[in-house]
Image: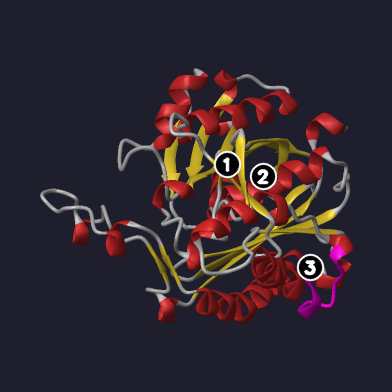
Amino acid sequence: MTVLNSHLPAVSIIGVGHHLPAQFEDNETLCQHLDVTPDWIIEKTGIERRYIAATEDTAWGYSVAAATQALEMAGITPTQLGMIICCTFSGDYQFPPLSAKVAQQLGAAQAQIFDLQANCSGFVAGLTSASDRMRVDPSVGYALVIGVEMCSRYIDRKDANTAIYLSDGAGAAVLGPALAGEGIQASAFHTDASNYEAVRLRGGGASFANNGRPFEAAVDLMEMNGIATWKQAITHLPPTIRRACAKAEVDVKALDFMVFHQANLRLIEYLVRKMGLSMEKTYTNVAQIGNSGSASLAIALSEAVRGGHIKNGDMVALAGVGAGFNFAASVWRWSLGAAR
């Protein structure tokens, strides 16, 4: 195999972790407030339940819990982190950044911090941002990338367009040095803003500031056009994955495993078929966990690794689609440091 950018240091994921709320909501409970049935939800989405954060839960608390697991697997301490990226659109505050609170709580005093908002593709974008930075500046050492969401805080539980999908949780990955040829091989991104308004949360933004404005459900809660999202995903995500594979000089059908943003089980099934692969080459948890935004791929990756679905040497693709719409994919030669 040709090693791309072989003059740059190799960077790999060396630890993963995740955290979920203590409580979940099944379809039967949710449908007491909706004009749809549990069977209809499963038919359209494959989702059977979704996890909902308790009132006292925080995005930083979930982030630290997931990060602690990932650091333990990686075998490093927070003081060794040179970077922390939190990928989220539902952090505890507008600012300061969630990543600063995480650094404080972990005791990662030397880490550069920033938050990344690319909606549900954020975790893939965060991994690429961290690995790119590490490869040009090895003094960074190790990086922590977290995907975390508190989606339930911004959802009308009577709105079937959002309530049937969205959930809460956090996932994390620690990146560190790897041997030549291991770790990240390539990434690809795409943007199509023709449906910019299809998935949105306007309240709290500068155009819909909260200052002096009463709560308005149509503005202050999440809106989503499921049909537009589906069309965008099936149109642009497969080509984005193929471009990442082409950069990595690997055929899509030669991939050993894929992990998608867990938006909708039916969507994942469609995408896998469209790419000529089988469901045996991917891991899904959306049926039991729901769509946790930027956290969803991170949680699925953590579960897949901990469940033994991904092994060292595997060529693995990660892919997601986020509002806007933006698309992200990356290809990795898997080499979990602790598993060597």
Q: Residues within 10 Å of mark 2 (few under 14, many from 20)?
A: many
Mark in front: 1 vs 2: 1
Estimate the spatial distance between the alpha carbons at disc 2 and disc 3, rounded to whole Å: 28 Å
Q: Which mark is residue 223?
A: none
Q: Position of residue 273 (x, y in %)?
A: 80, 77
For the residue pair 54 and 17, the one nearer the viewer reads as 54
Q: Residue beneath label 2, please?
A: 299
Q: As shown in the figure, which amino acid type bears the numbered disc 3?
A: Glu
Q: Residue beneath label 3, please?
A: 249
Does the magenta segment cover residue 176?
A: no
Asked if the residue under mark 2 is in contact with the one under mark 1, i.e. CB atoms within 8 Å, the reply is: yes
In the image, which residues are magenta?
272-279
Q: Residue beneath label 1, please?
A: 169
Estimate the spatial distance between the alpha carbons at disc 3 and disc 1, rounded to whole Å: 34 Å
In the rendered image, is residue 261 in sight? yes
197 up-or-down from 14: above or below = below
Helix, strand or loop at label 1? It is strand
Q: Residues within 10 Å of mark 3 (few under 14, many from 20)?
A: some
Q: As shown in the figure, which amino acid type bears the numbered disc 2?
A: Ile
Asked if the residue under mark 1 is in contact with the one under mark 3, i.e. CB atoms within 8 Å, the reply is: no
Q: Position of residue 16 (x, y in %)?
A: 70, 36
Q: Which circle's residue, 3 or 1, is located before the other in the chain?
A: 1
Q: As shown in the figure, which amino acid type bears the numbered disc 1?
A: Gly
Q: Position of residue 24 (x, y in %)?
A: 61, 43
Q: Position of residue 128 (x, y in %)?
A: 59, 52
Q: Give me the residue at 48% from left, 57% from top.
A: 119
Mark in front: 3 vs 1: 1
